[in-house]
Amino acid sequence: MGARGVPARILRVSTLGAGESGAPAGAARHPVAVTLPATATSAGFEFDDGSGADLVVTDGMALAWLPRKAAMEPGAKVRVRAWNAKDELVYDGSLTLF
């Protein structure tokens, strides 16, 4: 895959309970935070279950909720793609979630 010269990383974030995430009682949500190349202005996640998320990037960081159907086992991955202000791909790779 192209544009892997600058690394991206998943940041470990604790699971949030219903009160913090707006989920129904007893339904915790899992945030996924990622650091991206400093030139990134937009990005997208693609999860193993086929779902995805368009991300707002601020200062090289982005956040999304892990889809409820996404794999939660060790080794589960998310594909991350990021673009700069000129719509040039600056990162395309898979990152381990857990």
Image (cartoon, grey):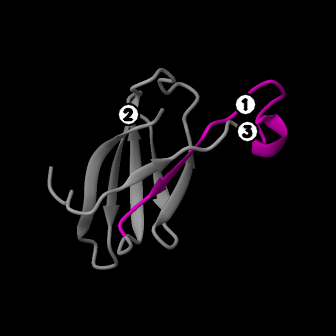
Name above or below for residue 16 compared with residue 68. below
Label 3, label 1: how many angstroms apart (C-alpha)? 6 Å
Q: Is mark 1 on a helix, strand or loop?
A: loop
Q: Name the residue under label 3.
A: 16
Q: Which of marks 2 and 1 is nearer the N terminus?
A: 1
Q: Which of marks 3 and 1 is nearer the N terminus?
A: 3
Residue 92 position, x and y percent, is 26, 53
Marks 3,1: beta carbons within 8 A = yes
Image-quadrant location for residue 36: bottom left
Q: Where is residue 73 in the image (x, y as percent from the top left)?
A: 48, 20
Q: Residue 80, relative to residue 59: is it above or below?
A: above
Residue at horizontal 72 percent and vertical 30 percent from the top: 28
In the displayed image of the protein, which residue is found farthest to the top? 73
Labels 2 and 1 touching (C-beta < 8 A): no
**Could you say which is closer to the camera, residue 50 or residue 38?**
38
Q: Is residue 23 above or below residue 81?
A: above
The residue that label 2 is drawn on is 77
Q: Is mark 3 on a helix, strand or loop?
A: loop
Residue position marked by numbered label 1 in the rendering: 28
**Residues in magenta, as a range:** 16-37
